[in-house]
Amino acid sequence: MLELATGKDRAAVNALARQVHEMHVAWRPDIFRMPEELYPEDRFAQVIRNRQLYVAKLNGIVAGFVLLKLKEYDSPGHLPRKVMVVDEICRLKPDILAATCWLFNHEALMHITSRVKAILPNVCLILGGPEFLGDNEAFLRRNPFVDCVFRGEGEEGFARWLKCWNKPEAWKDITGLCYLDRENRYQDNGLARVLAFDQLEAPEESELFNWSKPFVQLETTRGCFNTCAFCVSGGEKPVRTLSIEAIRQRLQVIQNHGIQNVRVLDRTFNFNPRRAKELLQLFLEFHP
């Protein structure tokens, strides 16, 4: 378990840091040099005040440490911002950490969540997303810091799980949830599907909805009648749709917030030519 470093740990941290840095100097003397101390008193005090330095102890002796670095985005292609994901999560001390895992963020997400779990071992970590549409046993055994993963569409199932997140004995009733039980046996609750898609609360109605982006994604249908192997929507039957009137109401809410860029998520836009024409006419109402 990791814990925030204290002044008493400075000598041990310096000794460990020196071992690693000696290799850096040996490999790349053109860019590295060996200082007297990598963590002099002023720097050590600063990283502790910023809650950036954590140590792992074995029988009371520092066996390792981790330094959380603040990353600044200030390139021409980024808006200026500072990011320290792990530190910010740990500062909030959440009971639950939930994240969506995609192919493009999988590696970074696993690094972040494993570090958070090391610092906050009691946080309950649940992951979902298209990376978990298959067999999840090997993943859970390979990453024991993950408490459970959700397979399928999560709006209904995740809401039910939140009511029993701290009672693993009740997880067996949550469709789509996959986890290792107290006896380390793999439990697989199948695949979750939201059949009443048109009855879901619109994301824009949530107080947590992020209106700071210059665009909004609007899902008008869910599912696909095709079975393309390369697509995560392949075989998601039946195709479920929102009514034209429901889409009109959501577009009005989006427009009232000053958003002009709407990205429509419709996997089978033209499978019904009549509906496709109605949608195009509706879009013209808002963006003639």
Image (cartoon, rainbow, N blue to C red):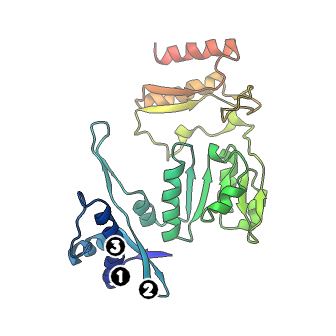
Along the line of sight, the residue nearer the viewer: 44 or 89 = 44
Which residue is drawn at the image coordinates 28% and 41% (left, top)?
75
Which amino acid lies under the numbered mark 1 shown in the image of this protein? Ala
Which residue bears the numbered disc 1?
12
Q: CA distance from mark 3 to mark 2?
A: 15 Å
Quick one: label 3 or label 1, which is nearer the N terminus? 1
Q: Vertical placement of 252 versus 139: above or below?
A: above
Q: Say which amino acid is labelled 3.
A: Ala
Q: Earlier in the sequence, mark 3 or mark 2?
A: 3
Q: Position of residue 250 (x, y in %)?
A: 55, 29
| Label 2 environment density (alpha carbons within 10 Å; few <14, some 14–19, many ≥20) | few
Q: Which mark is residue 61?
A: 2
Query: Looking at the picture, does residue 71 appear above or below residue 269?
Result: below
Name the amino acid, label 2: Ile
Question: Residue at 33% across / 58% down in the picture?
Answer: 70
Element class at badge 1: helix
Q: Are marks 3 and 2 in contact (CB under 8 Å)?
A: no
Mark 3 — residue?
17
Q: Residue 194 placed where, x, y %?
A: 72, 40
The number of numbered discs placed on residues in the rendered structure image is: 3
Mark 3–mark 1 distance (CA, rounded to whole Å): 9 Å
- Residue 258: image quadrant is top left
Instruction: Estimate the spatial distance between the alpha carbons at disc 2 and disc 1, rounded to whole Å.
Output: 8 Å
Q: Are marks 2 and 1 in contact (CB under 8 Å)?
A: yes
Q: Is residue 7 visible?
A: no
